[in-house]
Image (spheres, grey):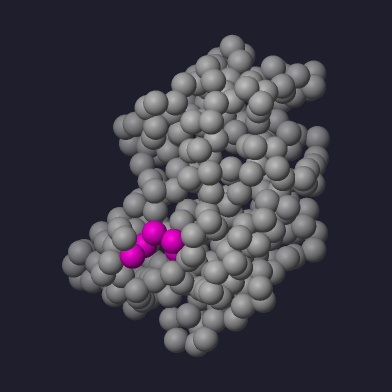
Amino acid sequence: MATGGHVVATDYQGLGTPGVHQYVVGATETHNVLDSVTAAQQLRPVRAGRKVAVPGWSQGGGAGLFVGQDAPAYSPGLDLVGVAAPAPAADLGPQFAGLVPPGPRNDSSESHNAALRINVYRGFLAAYPELRATDVLEPAGIQALEGDGVACIEHFADVIQNNVGDAHQLDALFKPLREVPDTWHQRFHENTPGYVTTVAPVLVMQGTADTVINPHSTEQYIRRACGFSRPVEYTTYEGATHNTIPFEAQQEYLSWIADRFAGSQAPSNC
């Protein structure tokens, strides 16, 4: 989102184009987001300005948090004024290390999260050639990995639910965490934001009834981000789900973004 009323959005590489979508790979998503801004700057008669705010929900929220850390190195000519992230995918490493307490659940959330986990593995396998699928997936998971390449995530989650979720056999897809090599855990850690400072103010909004992005994982990101000197504002929305938080929090993040472009001092409740 750029000044002068211009709005741009990335399609992320591998979505509708050749190659594999590198889901939640921080460097890839940062480049994809910032490339869309650079493209808008070069288009005539658009000529978007240098000031940029990045709003993003879910995967886009996690991408925004990485943009907040990495924008100066990749796009030094941009002036990043803020990142607003409803329900960001922000705590990959700790979750895959089993260090995040369980969050809200419903009848299909475990299968949906298993589908997202396989999607993460597929993206990492594309980004990091040294990784092996057999280190994280059982034979049934390898079969599911192939299906992930041809199905949208909601349909893919339904297939997992029908095949193993209803029978409470989701563990048949994944290697136990204790058997996953350190090479995978290192990549999970690298793609978890908050271990270095953001260069711009951050606003994070989280629904307490979110069964996709665990509220406990968002809280862990906030604790890390608050360890630095940049403003971090965190708001929870009681009863909001993953699908409702972008609407319930809309007034907050739109006003917050407008204030960042206006040059107002960013709030922080660390």
Q: Nearer the viewer, residue 245 or 92?
A: 92
Quadrant into which the C terminus falls: bottom right
Quadrant into which the N terminus falls: bottom left
- The residue most toward the top is 139
Secondary structure of the magenta portion, mostly?
helix
Does any portion of residue 224 appear in the rendered image? yes
Residue at the spot x=31%, y=70% of the render? 78
Is residue 191 shown in magenta?
no
Residue extent of the magenta highlight? 68-72
Residue at the spot x=77%, y=57% of the render? 208
On the image, the x and y values in percent for residue 177 come to 66, 28
Does any portion of residue 155 appear in the rendered image? no
Position of 113 compared to 168: left or right? left
On the image, the x and y values in percent for residue 114 come to 65, 31
On the image, the x and y values in percent for residue 145 come to 53, 22
> For residue 16, which quarter of the picture?
top left
